[in-house]
Amino acid sequence: MKLIDLRSDTVTKPTPAMRRAMADAEVGDDVYGEDPTVNRLQEHAAELFGKEAALFVPTGTMGNQICVRLHTRPGTEVVLEERSHIYNYEMGAAAVLSGVTLRPVRGADGGRLDWERVRGAIRHSAPYYVTSTSLVALENSHNMAGGSVLSLRTMAEICDGAHALGLPVHLDGARVFNAAQALGATVAEIAAPFDSVMFCLSKGLGAPAGSMIVGRKEFIREAVSVRKLLGGGMRQVGILAAAGRVALDESPNALIEDHANARRLAEGLAGMPGIAIDPEQVQTNIAIFDIGVTGLSTARFTEELRARGVLANGISPREMRMVTHYDVNRDEIERTLEIVQETLGKPLG
């Protein structure tokens, strides 16, 4: 039985074009800056995002943490949304690696921050508090807020407000291409007001591994040193970068289908007794839904789905998350809805 894997868009397999590019990649020692495939990917990414330079890194977590380290100083604070990846899913790395604390702020509907919420969380020097805020970090699209998207206007207002106070702003753009598709904007338009942006090649774009940081030349020059400090010097890594270049060129246009599949999934789920989800809130490729009133725990629900051929993740005792991607087609979305209905109606156990 082929499993329909909706746990994440990280489970995608490299496309045939990616595999060919990897096999044929021209490589060199990237720690010496001599891998031509990596260099071309970095130049292309910088151009695509309208920034001066870019750096290939092994993971999105490393990319985010390099940026946190370079933008902050020990004993200061980073303001971010309370469900953000940097706050919840990077193992406290900001404290361990950069000596900073994180100040979570509850976003409005869909986890959306705005300047008023951010401004209210910014600290200035005062007794008993963290010395001061040193960085604001946003996430777009916002994973654990159901793939919700911040508007260009909201991002610009937050960046303008922070910059007026002398604070840099970093964007965790792990799924920024999904955000761009939802907004009808370019990634350069999204990136424009930010001091640094991290984006993943290995999520919706489907590359087997790797992320990118983009920003000013001097910032990226310093990022190279921090990447090495963190163990991110990977030698002949053009083999991976080659797949990343294919992902940048070919995958963004396919995201519209992933978004349509997520919306169809949400619409189908919304019509089932015991499931709570608003399809209008599903803007990208992530659907989060509440099964609390069904009487099933998410752990049990996950087991029942797996037994019938669907992989999904519970993210709380009540909430499930399903993520669409190019390895799941519309027929499989329809089959998933049938399986969810079967599971609600008659658990196997």
Image (cartoon, rainbow, N blue to C red):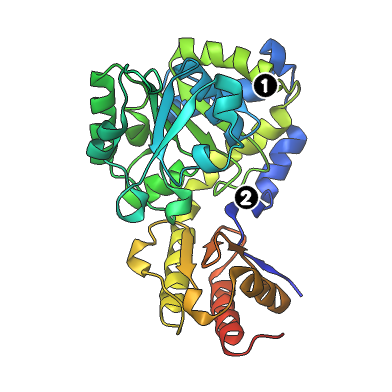
Residue type at mark 2: give it.
Thr
Pick the quarter of the image with the C terminus.
bottom right
- Gap between marks 2 and 1 measured at Cα: 22 Å
Residue 162 visible in the current orientation: yes
- Residue at x 32%, y 24% (from the top left corner): 123
Q: Is residue 13 above or below residue 239?
A: below
Percent across and percent down for residue 146 are 44, 57
Image x and y of residue 311, in percent: 66, 67
Is 161 on the left-hand or right-hand side of 44? Answer: left
Q: Amino acid at mark 1?
A: Leu
- Eyeballing the image, is 349 above or below 220? below
Residue where numbered disc 1 is placed: 230
Q: Would residue 107 be found to the left or right of residue 42 on screen?
A: left
Badge nearest the viewer, 2 or 1? 1
Quadrant of the rendering where the N terminus is positioned = bottom right
Q: Earlier in the sequence, mark 2 or mark 1?
A: 2
The answer, for residue 40, to whether it is visible in the render is: no
Q: Residues within 10 Å of mark 2 (few under 14, many from 20)?
A: some
Q: Which residue is mark 2?
A: 10
